[in-house]
Amino acid sequence: MEGNSIVQLKKGETILRNVLLSDIADYERWFHTETEWMDWDAPWEVWEDGEAEEFVKGIAARVDQTPETFYRFEVATAGGEHIGWVSAYHMDDGGLAVGIDIPAFSSRGKGHGKRALQMFLTYLFEKTNRETLYTQTWSGNTRMVRLAEALGFAVCGRVKDCREVRGALYDGLTFSLQRAAANCFRDVF
């Protein structure tokens, strides 16, 4: 076993866990060679020289840490393959929003993203006592839009034509999920 490896949450073939030292090689690959996922996760944001390296160093600094409340988990398969992450961040208005990235292309379309977000949302509702959680994306990210809707999120904010991606304009979307609506997947893990 590596470091303080603690499996935090598990549902079917999907695991949310703390970061391991072995995950750093995956991040190096995802930020430098297998970057297709960046075409969907805020593609208007351009990483300047050295920013990806600093981000990966920040992830590496979290190895063996076990905070009271996790605002980031690594997503892995039951077979142990590290395939991505879920994270939460505070929006400008103080709301707590969640995000997910599954850079491992071969792991998409297998339900890992949905299970990972269900577990993460359930976890955050329990740990933070918030009544509402959010997610944000752009209208061209149809996979994320479909996932949010499948989990019970509803659009609560739209900024028309605010995102330019590959020469086209898209809406910025904010979705909300009420604690009561999330109770339908409380038996997630």
Image (cartoon, grey):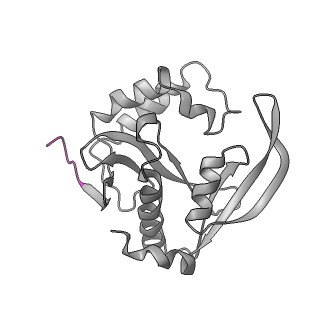
Identify whether 68 is placed above or below 22.
below
Left or right: 69 as drawn, with respect to 147: left
Q: Quadrant of residue 12?
A: bottom left
Identified at 46% across, 35% down, the residue is 105
- Given residues 79 and 2, the one toward you in this image is 79
- Magenta segment boundaries in residue numbering: 1-6
Could you tell me residue 146's position as x and y percent? Answer: 62, 56
Identified at 75% across, 28% down, the residue is 166
Identify whether 86 is placed above or below 20.
below
Could you tell me residue 40's position as x and y percent? Answer: 62, 38
Is 2 colored magenta in this rendering? yes
Left or right: 43 as drawn, with respect to 166: left
Q: Quadrant of the C terminus?
A: bottom left
Q: Quadrant of residue 94?
A: bottom right
Could you tell me residue 165's position as x and y percent? Answer: 75, 33
Identify whether 154 is placed above or below 79.
below
Is 88 colored magenta in this rendering? no
Q: Residue furthest bottom?
A: 180
Q: From where the camera sits, is residue 124 visible? A: yes
Could you tell me residue 184's position as x and y percent? Answer: 48, 78
Q: Residue furthest front?
A: 109
Q: Residue furthest left?
A: 1
Identified at 41% across, 31% down, the residue is 27
Q: From where the camera sits, is residue 96 visible? A: no
Q: Quadrant of residue 162?
A: top right
- Given residues 6 and 79, the one toward you in this image is 79
Q: Main secondary structure of the magenta part?
A: loop
Identified at 52% across, 26% down, the residue is 35
